Amino acid sequence: MITVADGAARALETRHQKPRLIFPAALFDVPTPLRLRSPACLFFLSFFVLLGGLFQPPSLWAQTVTQNNIDDDTPGAWPAHSTGWKAVCIIGECGGGTPGGTVAPTSTSQTIDNATPSLDGESMFLSLTSPSGMASTDNAEALWTYIAGVDENATNFQTTVHIYPGANIVSANAVEMDHFSFSTSRNEEIMMAHECVLGHFWQVWNGQTANWVNTTLACSGATSLPASTWTEVVFNDHIVPGDLTDCSGFTCMHFDSITINGTVYPINMSEPAQVLPAGWASGVGMQLQMDIPYNGGSAETVTANVDEVSFVATEYAPPTGLQVTVQ
């Protein structure tokens, strides 16, 4: 039996699946499911399916890992669950990684289902408190990482964050929002990190030098993250798998654009990726980080709420096979 979908407008489900072709049964003027046993009919149908696949727009070729409203997910659910938030990462307690910084914060917090402030009634609250007595060269930092799934072939990445910094954001040095792709088969860490250095510039990450690189986009005024105000930030970046010629033998992380409250700001910068640290597993996802610098030696607390946070990793490629169920 050949099963024909009963509406051309039905959405194509691409998450974790190969593309399936959908076309209207009305073209055949017969009820569904359609039972065709004639070899001539089967040939015609196969030809129709082939043409439909070849002329599908690229968006329908894409396979995706998509996670929406991840600010509503329980903190610390990973690795007991295959996706979810990891436990907060602070210096010395990060399972092999590090958020940076020189001293550990005295406390952090990550809570969900906060009604105020929120956009949908359920925001996530983040906080970080630095110790007193920090030296002038010290930083206290905390990193919250979300594992969205696994797709070593993902090429395009989009993260959307609605953020409401507290009034105490003036004590922070920077707010960081990233997405990443870790591949054990390529032994590669794609860390597309974006940092708003408050009052200065947005920066992106160079994996080879392990340094931040200034963009031309200021982190001030309309392109900053003002206190006690909701700001929507969307990051769009991509890679070209196998292209190792433009970034000193490493995959280039192409930082495409940052969209702030609906205005697109092209970044158009490329920085090299880095080798995957030993023992790390494959995965894609996003993360948030806040940094507190030396502020005269007193303890400081920085807070922010985030809401309607989403992550999409997309694998763009022409269809290599078309699925037709024949029974």
Image (tube, rainbow, N blue to C red):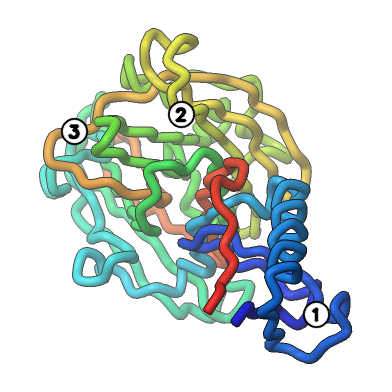
Residue 153 lies left or right of residue 307; in this view the side is left
Residue at far bottom of view: 31
Q: Position of residue 231 (x, y in %)?
A: 65, 54
User: Which numbered circle lies on residue 241?
Assistant: 2
Q: Position of residue 79 (x, y in %)?
A: 21, 64
Q: Position of residue 80 (x, y in %)?
A: 20, 71
- The mark nearer the N terminus, 3 or 1, is 1
- The mark nearer the N terminus, 1 or 2, is 1
Residue depicted at 49% across the width and 64% down the height: 67
- The mark nearer the N terminus, 2 or 3, is 2
User: From what the image shows, is residue 194 above or below residue 115?
Assistant: above
Residue 147 lies left or right of residue 313; in this view the side is left
Per the model, the C-alpha gap separating discs 1 and 2 is: 39 Å
Q: Position of residue 64 (x, y in %)?
A: 53, 55
- Check disc 1 and give the amino acid type: Ala
Which residue, given by chain and number where applicable, does mark 3 sit on? 277
User: Which numbered circle lies on residue 25?
Assistant: 1
Per the model, the C-alpha gap separating discs 2 and 3 is: 19 Å
User: From what the image shows, is residue 325 above or below residue 227?
Assistant: below
* Residue closest to the eye, 135 or 9: 9
- Check disc 2 and give the amino acid type: Pro
Q: Is residue 305 visible?
A: no
Which image quarter: residue 320?
top right
